[in-house]
Image: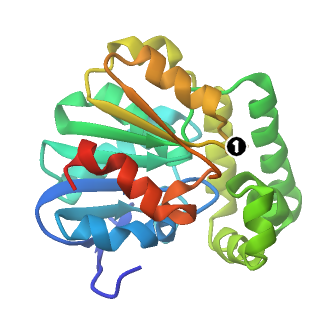
């Protein structure tokens, strides 16, 4: 991350975050298989116009774990908004699991947001997707987070990217080994149980959905479902990109959200 980041901790010590820039609030929520560093490539551009707060999800970089319920994650983000004095009218950007949490938060607290950007997120998963989370949780229980390094790399990135960036596997290992295994398993179970699809039609926050065309973790069809059911939502697909556009294709991601967030 940028060297001018200010580290934040909630008064009761449950949530950590980092902040940079000045202006209207943008809040970033990272994916389950990455951390807030996944936004490093886009952070300088965002910080030029906004006050950017990167919240560490439960289990990451000192943020304490929560029960395996999506509502528990929403409550933690609500608490972070209060503790870190994020003003009404913020734009919330979430990638992957962070996108699912962001969507649930927007449904519960639309009054806090002026815009919602969901990158490679799902409102719920079919059985095949649920089984993948069950498998990862089981492997972590048996062998720790190091046991899913290859799985994580292949979910975050596509084959062409991994072929060009062989160090990406080691990067995933470094990230995963910093996560609280109990919190990781809780997130997997929350993703198995979550189903926000019936609520999408009542979302009242302007929404942009951005998806990598080669995403294997949350394929385009799941992202398009959000755009189809949320009133007025827009969908942008990035060719040749996997699960984490801010990391893999930062300039394309910034171009996709530019008009929506006011860059």
Vertical position of residue 7 compared to residue 179: above or below:
below
Determine the residue located farthest toward the bottom in the rendered image. Answer: 3
In the figure, residue 260 lies in which quadrant? top left
Vertical position of residue 197 compared to residue 218: above or below:
above
Which residue lies at the image location 32% right of the left edge and 38% below the top edge?
A: 116
Q: Residue 145, percent across and down?
A: 77, 65
Q: Residue 248, percent across and down?
A: 58, 63
Report the quarter where the C terminus lies: bottom left
Which residue lies at the image location 31% right of the left edge and 20% below the top edge?
A: 232
Query: Looking at this view, is 91 or 130 the one in front?
Result: 91
Q: Note whether residue 9 is visible.
A: no
Determine the residue located farthest toward the front in the rendered image. Answer: 239
Q: Secondary structure at mark 1?
A: loop
Report the quarter where the N terminus lies: bottom left
Q: Note whether residue 245 is visible.
A: yes
Q: Is residue 210 left or right of residue 130?
A: left
Vertical position of residue 19 compared to residue 181: above or below:
below
Report which residue position mark 1 lands on.
217
Q: Is residue 19 left or right of residue 105?
A: left
Query: Looking at this view, is 252 or 78 the one in front?
Result: 252
Question: Which class describes the residues within 10 Å of circle 1: few (<14), some (14-19), or many (20+)?
Answer: many
Q: Residue 257, percent across and down?
A: 34, 48
Q: Is residue 30 left or right of residue 113?
A: right
Q: Is residue 132 left or right of residue 238?
A: right
């Amino acid at each position: 991350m940028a060297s001018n980041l200010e580290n934040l901790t909630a008064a009761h010590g449950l949530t950590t975050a980092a902040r940079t820039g000045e202006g209207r609030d943008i809040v970033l929520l990272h994916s389950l298989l990455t951390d807030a560093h996944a936004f490093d490539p886009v952070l300088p551009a965002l910080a030029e116009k906004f006050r950017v707060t990167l919240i560490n999800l439960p289990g990451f970089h000192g943020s304490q774990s929560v029960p395996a319920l999506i509502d528990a994650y929403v409550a933690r983000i609500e608490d972070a908004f209060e503790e870190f004095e994020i003003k009404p009218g913020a734009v919330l950007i979430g990638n992957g699991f962070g996108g699912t949490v962001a969507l649930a938060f927007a449904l519960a607290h639309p009054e806090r947001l002026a815009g919602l950007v969901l990158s490679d997120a799902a409102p719920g998963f079919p059985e095949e997707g649920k089984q993948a989370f069950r498998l990862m949780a089981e492997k972590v229980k048996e062998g720790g987070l190091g046991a899913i390094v290859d799985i994580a790399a292949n979910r975050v990135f596509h084959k062409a990217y991994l072929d060009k960036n062989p160090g990406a596997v080691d990067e995933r290992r470094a990230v995963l080994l910093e996560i609280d295994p109990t919190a990781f398993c809780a997130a997997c179970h929350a993703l198995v149980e979550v189903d926000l699809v019936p609520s999408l039609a009542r979302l009242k926050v302007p929404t942009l959905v951005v998806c990598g065309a080669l995403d294997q973790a949350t394929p385009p069809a799941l992202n398009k479902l959000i755009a189809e059911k949320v009133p007025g939502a827009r969908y942008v697909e990035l060719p040749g990109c996997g699960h984490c556009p801010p990391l893999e294709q930062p300039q394309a991601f910034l171009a996709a959200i530019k008009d929506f967030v006011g860059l």
